[in-house]
Each structure stands twice: as structure tokens, then as C-alpha cells.
Image (cartoon, coloured by chain):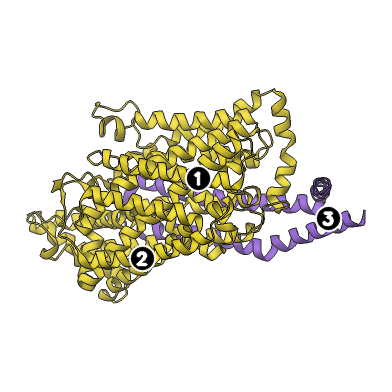
Chain colours: A purple, B yellow
Amino acid sequence: MIRQDQEALVAAVAADPRYVALVARRARLDWTLSAIIFTAFVGYLLLIAFDPALLATPIGAGVTSLGIPLGLGLILLAIALTGFYVRQANRHHDAQMAAILNDAMAQGRGA
Amino acid sequence: MRALLLGTLALLLPAPAFAAALEGEAQRQPINWVAIAMFVGFVGLTLWITKAAAARTRTASDFYTAGGGITGFQNGLAMAGDYMSAASFLGISAQIFTDGYDGLIYSTGFLVGWPILLFLMAERLRNLGRFTFADVASYRFAQPPVRSFAAVSTLLVVSFYLVAQMVGAGQLIKLLFGLPYAAAVVIVGGLMMLYVLFGGMRATTWVQIIKAVLLLGGASFMALMVLAQTGFSLETLFARAVEVRTQAALANGESAVDAAASGRAIMAPGGFIKDPVSAISFGLALMLGTAGLPHILMRFFTVPDAKEARKSVLWATGWIGYFYILTFIIGFGAILLVGTNAAYLDGEGALRGGGNMAAIHLAHAIGGNAFLGFISAVAFATILAVVAGLTLSAASAVSHDLYATVFRHGQASSADELRVSRLTTLALGALAVLLGLVFEQQNVAFMVSLAFALAASGNFPVLILSLLWSGCTTRGAAWGGTIGLLTAFILTLLSPAVWTATFGLGAAPFPYSSAAIISVPAGFLAIWLISLADRSPRAALDKAGYPAQRVRAETGLGAFAASDH
């Protein structure tokens, strides 16, 4: 019986247009962020492989080369993107999903 | 006792970049009593925690996941503790000391897998799984084939990683503590077995958390002291490092123009990336391999829910990224404070004790013998935390995936499963010590890059496609994943690090430093093609199971909670 309830609940959630929209929105965010970090890293490697001289260029009059902020920037980008994802999930996605689940459960009890 | 040391720490890391830092001999150091006293303190504390954890380790769930009650913050620290090896600390800082900029390329490669792990997998793993990543990979499939694939893959990845850690540990401890190699390997193997055997995931987690705090604290202090010398200016730090190198080149008789170029070379990418294909291949292995390491994936099941799972990755990414930035500063600090001090150099101007000693000598330069002892003890603790996590994940693959699910068809009691885990832990510990002793004189540098390539080519494609593609079938996952693993394995054997450097068979048939550029697409393609061609009745069931799996993965409906876990 519990199993049947569970199946009905899953079906109710899956049929909810808000669920479909939320999952699509999240998938877009997942893939966009993955593409950003993937492209940034592969781009960084390609730059090192094909134009190391560019990375060796000093910034302004100092000795610090362009490669330093790029490399450290990549580390900071990785942290920033995970932070952004967690913030989106905490601020928006969790509450939206909880509302969908609540409604599905209420609907299950009503039926 | 002198032994040829082929890359004390390169053993723990992929091969090419460490060649420069790690060539040459390293002799056993005089016995360091401060380091030993501090290490004994660490061991005492962790064994006390293990004893406390043992009293609470009664079920398989306690053993595998600490009952699922670890918080996101704790788990993030433990993940960082699981991932930041002694190699990252000593090896990368040593590489920066030698080559400058190149060390940073490594660091970025080790970090960029974490965001991908978060965006595509972390929450879904937690929602679908219970103890091991195989729970997730086999969720809607026939259990025996997919579980067997996942267990074999886990054992392979863990074994290579573990042997590399054991050999590295033996060499490192000989170096830092002045203990014989064999004693060091037995101590590491013995302690690791005690933690895992009695304390399971709870003790392992705390060992990793304590180690992470010690390592981050020690490294922060070193970086701070370095920056204090340069008025907290990175530009000044770099300028002085370039100046040191320019002076050294002038002293070597180079012309003023050449010497200036030699000095500036540490500000630019150097020999690390030889050809673009190797660079991309190696980058892929590091990035995607991180998201397929069984001992890292297992940590997602120690938290109560998906929300804590994603918090763990944020903390882990933050701590690991911070750690690599510190390592960068420490490496340049060593150029200033170690490279210019004759007390740390031998007659030929090389580092005393071997190429990996840059951070260790820097610790001495900053805080004298006491701080040197502290950093040495932290390096030892670091190895223990990493090998404990590895052993636990291999033991789980054997007891939960092979024994309980495949052989007993899910009918094994929690007590039986626990007994098998412990037997496996004993066997693995003994095997790790044995292999550590056997491989003492071998160059096992390729083993960690092999572990990453295997994880990227087998586990990663299977997890991604089983989670996100409705058309994936049992046959596709089990056989496609196996093809990915085999491709990575065979190409690594044919690559320069193994074919030429380890076996001395001449020019390598596969010329690139990592197999990933071929083996990762091979894994994905094989799973896709085999699934498409699969017209079996089981394939229909597999596809029909996707919608329910998807809802659970996205919502957490029906996920194992901390209590029933």
C-alpha cells in the first residue's frame, strides 16, 4: 500500500507542469554552469599550449604576468560558480520544489 | 640506508610535471623527535576518536556512512581532507619552487572537477543512493552486471591510488621522520586498518576533518609569514623571486640578458605542457576523474539530504581552492627563503633531502624545529586520512555491492555485511602493506594518473548517462563502462609514463601523457551504442524505470533519510 501511495505521489509530481518547468530550469542552469567551467579550463589549457608568450606578458610595469590572475582567477571562478549554484538552489529551487511536493501530497490525501 | 628515490611525491601524482622537481636522490633524514612527538599526539587523538566511534558503529549504515548524520560543513572539510594529499602540498609547492608558474596549472586541474561534480551529480547521487555510488549507477538496472562493473572499477581505482599513496608514504616518512621505509609502510597500513576496522566512516570522517584543519592551518600560517616578508604584496613576492633567479643565473655565468630571461621564466608556463593533445587529455582526466572517484562519491551518502550534499561541495571547493592558492604562495616563498639559504642546499645548490623538501625547509625557515616537526606530522596525518578513505570505499564495494547485492541478492543482514566489510578491510590493509613493500624501488608515478583516467572513463560516463539519459540500459552501462575502463587501462600501459619510463620498452605506441582524450569519449560512445542496439526485454524495463528514477533524483522523494540509512 505504501508502495502504491509512493507511485501515485511520483505520478502526481511528474504530471505537475510547475515540476516540469522547474526541472527544465534547473537542467539549464546545471549545463550552463558546467559549460562555463569546462570551457574556461580547456580554454586556459589551450592558451598555455598555443600562446604561452601571451601568459608571460607582464601586467603594467611590474613582473606579475598575465598568467597569474588567469590561473588564480580560474580557481576563484570554480568557487564562485559553486557558490552561485548553491545560492540559486537555496533561495529559489528548494522552496519551489517543496511547494510542488506539498501540493502533490495534499492531493494524495484528498483523493 | 640510502635508496634511490624516484619521485617521493610524484608517486602520489600524475607523472610529467614532477619529473623536474623529483629527480635525484633523497637520503633518510636524522630522526626528528619533535615531528614524532607531534605525530604521536595526532595518532593518540584519532585513536581515541576511533574508540568513541567504535561504540557507535553497530550497523552497516554506521560503518559506511556514519549513520548519514554528518553536516554539510563537516562533510565539506572531510572531502577536502580526503582530496588534499601530501603530494598536493609538498609536490606542488616543490614544483613551484623549481619551475614557478607550472605548479598553478596542476592546481587548477585538481579543482575544476568539483563544480562539475556539484552541477551534474551531487544532489542526484544523494537522492538515489544509500552507501556506494553503485547504488546510483545501478538504480533502475539489473543489479548484478552494473554492480559488478562498479565494484571492479572501484577496486581498480582504489588499488592504484592506494599503492601510489603507500609507496609515497614510505618514502616521505623515511625522509621526514628518519624511520626505515618498511616501518613507515607498516605504520601507515596498521593505523589505517584500525581507523576503518573499528571506527568505520565516523572515525574516517573525523581523521579527515582533523587533518584538513591541521593542513589548512599550517599552510595558512606559512603563507602569512611569507607574505609578511613582502609587505603583503604578491607583486613584491614575485619580483623578489624573479630577482633571486636572475642572480642565480648570473652567478652561473649567464649574460645579463639571458639571466633576466631565466629569472622571468618562473612567471610563465614552461615545460609542463609539451603538446596540446596531452594537455587537454590530462586536463580531462583530472577534471572528470574527480567526479568519478569512488571514495569522494561515497562521502555524499554521509549527509542527511541533497541540500547538505550541495553544501558539502561548496565547502570542499572553497577549502581546496584556498589551499591551492596557499600552496602557490608557499612555493614562491620557498624561492625567497629556502633557495637563498645555504643551510638548506647541498654542494650543488639542490635542496637537501630531495626536491620535495621545499615546503619542509620553508617551515624550518619560518618557525624553526618546532614548526618543521608540526608540518612533518601534518604530512604524515595527511597520508593516513587519504588511505583510510580509500580503504573504506573499497571495503564497501566488496561488502555492499559484491557480497550483499550480487552474491546474496540483497538478502544479507546488516551484521553479515558489516562482517564482510571488516574482513575486506583486513585483507586490503595487508595487501596495501605488501604492495607498498614490493613496489618500494619502482616508479609508480603513473598509478595516480591511471586511477584518475579510469574514474573519468568508466565511472563518470556510467553515472552521467544512467542519471540523465532515459535510453541507457543495463547492458549499455555494464559493458560500455567496462569498455571505457579497458581503453583507459590499455592506453595507459602503452603511454610514455609506463611503456618507456617504467618498463623501458622504448618509444611509446601511445604518445600522449593521458589516455582520457580517447578513453572518456570511448566510454560514452560505447554506453550509447550498446544501449541503442539493446533490444532485450531487460532494456525495456530499464527505460521504463527512468521517469520514476528521475522524479526521485530531482525531488528526493523516497530517498534514504539519516535514520533508516
Secondary structure of the residue carrying tag 3 is helix
Q: Residue at x 29, y 49 (%)?
A: B186
Q: Which residue is mark 1?
A: B421
Q: Are marks 2 and 3 on the same chain?
A: no
Whole-number angstrom distance, CA of label 2 to CA of label 3: 52 Å
Q: Nearer the viewer, residue B203 or B456?
A: B203
Q: Is residue B37 depicted above or below B61 in this figure?
A: below
Task: Write down the chain letter for disc 2.
Answer: B
Q: Are marks 3 and 1 on the same chain?
A: no
Q: Is residue B288 depicted above or below B48 in this figure?
A: above
Describe residue A27's horizontal placement relative to residue B440 as left or right.
right
Q: Nearer the viewer, residue B306 or B243?
A: B306
Q: Residue at x 27, y 45 (%)?
A: B271
Describe residue A74's horizontal placement relative to residue A68 as left or right.
right
Q: Are marks 2 and 1 on the same chain?
A: yes
Q: Is any part of residue A54 visible from this angle?
A: no
Q: Is any part of residue B384 visible from this angle?
A: yes
Describe residue B316's horizontal placement relative to residue B504 as left or right.
right
Q: Which residue is mark 2?
A: B44
Secondary structure of the residue carrying tag 1 is helix
Q: Residues within 10 Å of mark 2 (few under 14, many from 20)?
A: few
Image coordinates for residue B127, horizontal then vertical, percent: 65, 51
Front: mark 3 or 1: 1
Describe residue B519's horizontal placement relative to residue B304 as left or right.
left
Q: Nearer the viewer, residue B528 or B234?
A: B528
Whole-number angstrom distance, CA of label 2 to CA of label 1: 25 Å
Q: Residues within 10 Å of mark 1 (few under 14, many from 20)?
A: many
Q: Which residue is mark 3?
A: A104
Front: mark 2 or 3: 2
